Amino acid sequence: MTPLLVAVGWVLVGLASAFVMIRRGHDALLWVVLGLAAGPFAIALAGLAVYLEREELAEAAVIPGESLEGDVRVLVCIDGSEAADHAAVTVVLLLGARLQTVTLLTVLDYDVARDVSPDRLDRIAAGIQSAAVGQLADLAVHPFSTRATGSAAEQILRRTGSGAYDLFALGSHRQRRSRFLGSVAREIANKAPIPLLTVRAAPVESIESAERAARLGLPIEPES
């Protein structure tokens, strides 16, 4: 076997292990680096990481918000991007009086959550959600809030299948895809029992400009 074939095999096995771990909810950059460096030995590292995954981190209490008079309960994934914040604002504006509750969900990597106290995880999630919470407060909407740890698709599907929500929304970037799009969104679209809406990101200078965009028919796309 030539050195080139050995090197190619090393990289491919390492990247395959990294892909599996990323799908399980581990840090993408960390595992790509580990996969490239460790090659076949990344399989052992992945096995150890799976063993160390702590299931109790997957669930967190929902921090209460405010219920309105409508009948639609919305779940929005917030990852700290402007696109996700924009999705939360836009779905509120489009639903109007039909809105009952908005719940913001932030999914953290296992590698971020390991050896971190629950209180610290709550503060991390609150920081990620702070911009969306502030923008919704300007619309007199006070969202519920929760966090999860692990695979984004698994945690989202767990909640969309719970019967607690009627609509799931997330934001997409114009120039790039967020971590919740692509294969994750397709998996959610195929398996979730409630509708999935993706909201195209657009520069938003104020709540007024977001409302104006909503009135003009801001693109809202069912993920296919």
Image: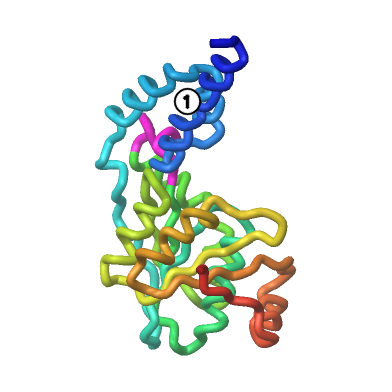
Question: Which residue is painted at 39% across and 52% down in the image?
Answer: 147
Residue 64, x across and y down, in percent: 34, 65
The residue depicted at 39 percent of the width and 41 percent of the height is 24
Indicate the secondary structure of the residue bearing disc 1. Answer: helix
Q: Residue at x 36, y 76 (%)?
A: 166
Is 27 positioned to the left or the right of 171 in the image? left
Q: Residue 116: within the magenta?
A: yes
Residue 45, x across and y down, in percent = 39, 21
Q: Which residues are magenta?
A: 108-117
- Work out whether residue 99 or residue 183 is closer to the camera in this orientation and state it: 183
Drawn side of residue 60 relative to residue 122, left or right: left
Question: Is residue 144 located in the magenta-colored stretch of the structure?
Answer: no
Closer to the camera, 47 or 105?
47
How is this picture coloured? Answer: rainbow
Is 207 displayed left or right of 197 in the figure?
A: right
**Which residue type carries mark 1?**
Val
Name the residue located 35 percent from the left edge and 52 percent from the top edge: 154
Residue 199 sits above or below residue 215 on the image: above
Instruction: Please determine whether, in this image, residue 72 is positioned above or below residue 153.
Output: below
Q: How many marks?
A: 1
The x, y position of residue 183, in whole percent, is 49, 54
Q: Give the residue pinned by disc 1.
A: 13
Residue 204 image point, x, y percent: 71, 68
Residue situated in front as seen by the camera: 153 or 99: 153
Tell me if residue 55 comes above or below residue 103 in the rendering.
above
Q: Quadrant of residue 164?
A: bottom left
Dot 1 surroundings within 10 Å: few (below 14), some, or many (20 or more)?
A: some
Rendering quarter of residue 52: top left
Farthest residue, direction front: 1
- The image shows residue 57, relative to residue 199, as above or below, that is above
